[in-house]
Amino acid sequence: MVAGLARVVAARDRFVELARDLGPDAPTLCAGWVVRDLVAHLLVLQRDPLAWPGVGVPALAGLTERRMAAQVASGFDAALDTLAARSPRFPVMPDDLPGGPMLHHLGEYVVHTEDMARPNHVPGTAADADLADALWARAQRVAAYFGRTRRRGLVLVRTDVAASAAVLLGPETTVVSGAPLELLVWAYRGPAVAGVGVTDAAAIPSP
């Protein structure tokens, strides 16, 4: 848990640093959201259970938006100070149990850092070997979740080391290759903003 928590704290701190550098009104990859909205989003995930249902249920999105606005009502810098001072855990994410690697938490901070960095053409996440391994594990889970309704096989190929993973099975297979960070961004945001290669294959390739 210590290693997982340390990675999450570092990712949270990088998010806060970049958000502060860019300012509240800088654009992001999240449609309709600026940096201020990403900060509010993370704050409600941390401490506002009443806002959680609207994250995934469109009918309740208005409530979530109002509660997000309340999180930054005291000012952008104050909101960032609060985010930096709190535990980085998100209780709404029960798949990361105490003692686990906290991959869901890690992915949340990392992908939202990239949401800020890429449209503003500034450096985002620098992934050493340890972080790359964690992002590789998280990318597989995210890709499997978002691809589950497509009825296609999906193989992720990690290009920084010789590794591949069949995350979904199907009669036709899409192969997506890239570094772990790029695969994570692809899983969340698609190929337009991720440095990946996407090809179709009749069979699953060998690692």
Image (cartoon, grey):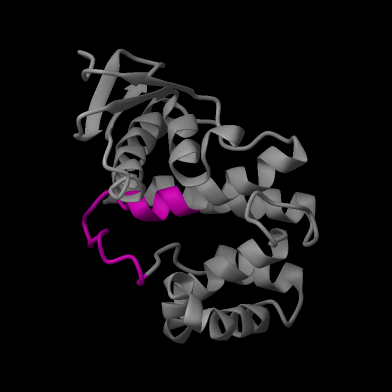
Count of numbered labels shown in the rendering: 0
Q: Residue at x 62, y 62 (%)?
A: 38
Q: Residue at x 43, y 75 (%)?
A: 57
| Residue 75: quarter of image | bottom right
Answer whether residue 197 is magenta in the image. no
Residue 185, placed above or below residue 63: above
Answer whether residue 101 is magenta in the image. yes
Residues in magenta, as a range: 91-108
Residue 62, placed above or below residue 23: below
| Front residue (pair 193, 44) | 193
Residue 191, placed above or below residue 162: below
In the image, residue 69 lies at what x, y percent? 67, 80
In the image, residue 28 lies at what x, y percent? 69, 51
Q: Residue at x 41, y 16 (%)?
A: 160
Q: Quadrant of the C terminus?
A: top left
User: Relative to 156, is 111 on the left or the right?
Assistant: right
* Main secondary-structure element of the magenta-colored stretch: loop
Q: Quick check: can you spot residue 124?
A: yes
User: Relative to 156, is 53 on the left or the right?
Assistant: right
In the image, residue 43 lies at what x, y percent? 55, 71
| Residue 144: quarter of image | top left
In the image, residue 113 lies at what x, y percent? 59, 47
Q: Quick check: can you spot residue 8?
A: no
